[in-house]
Amino acid sequence: MTTAVIYLAGPEVFLPNAVALGAAKKALCQRYGFTGLFPLDAELEAGDTTELAWAISRGNEALIRQADRVIANLTPFRGPSADVGTVYELGFARGLGKQLMGYSNDPTPFANRTWAQFGITGEPGPVGDIRDRDGLKIEEFGLHDNLMIEGGIRQAGGLFISHNASVNDRYTDLTAFERLLQTLV
């Protein structure tokens, strides 16, 4: 019997304890009978800084190709939405026909986070026409992130869940990640 392989996408690679967190996620995968591939698992050969960037990109795409599915940490990162690299990886995996799953450790809806991120004061405006400080429409679908992210996960047969982690554990809490693994068993 072959073990299903899961690519573990998310902004964890930027954390000071990235290697340890990747190991913890891979151990949880193993506990539930899966093999986890963490982005830092890619074997890289590169020279200068730019070459390293391209090597990381190639390496992560290679890991995604090896995987049967992707579980992505879509907790807002450096803004009101998920890490842009993680979102790219989801789109790449969707294009390859992989099953997608995602989670966020911030249950606040995308519209509320966007409103708060830009420090807009006053009332948001009439429902259906909430705008940011530049007058641009803010998505109001009650989703946790941009509709294309959650829509892609749903249409790929996946699941998106959220968990209310403490602010200090926003990127390291693995409760929602483990819940997704449990749904796959």
Image (cartoon, rainbow, N blue to C red):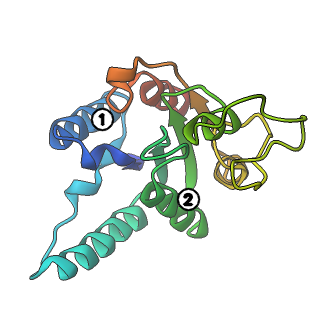
Apparent side of residue 72 relative to residue 115 in the rendered image (left or right)? left
- Give coordinates of residue 27: x percent, y percent: 25, 32
SS for callout 1: helix
The answer to whether 54 is drawn above or below residue 89 in the figure is below
The answer to whether 77 is drawn above or below residue 178 in the figure is below
Nearest to the observer: residue 71 or residue 49:
49
How many marks are shown on the rendered structure? 2
Residue at the (34%, 63%) spot, across then down: 63
Apparent side of residue 53 relative to residue 116 in the rendered image (left or right)? left
Apparent side of residue 129 relative to residue 31 in the rendered image (left or right)? right
Nearest to the observer: residue 77 or residue 71:
77
Tell me the residue that label 1 is attached to: 25
- Is the Cβ of the residue at disc 2 closer than 8 Å to that at disc 1? no
**Which quadrant holds residue 51?**
bottom left
SS for callout 2: loop
Circle number at residue 183: none
Residue at the (49%, 52%) spot, across then down: 69
Inspect the image, locate mark 1, and give the three-letter code of the amino acid beneath it: Lys
Circle number at residue 98: 2
Mark 2 nearby-residue class (10 Å; few <14, some 14–19, many ≥20): many
Rounded to the nearest angstrom, the CA distance separating label 2 from label 1 is 19 Å
- Give coordinates of residue 95: x percent, y percent: 60, 69
Nearest to the observer: residue 41 or residue 79:
79
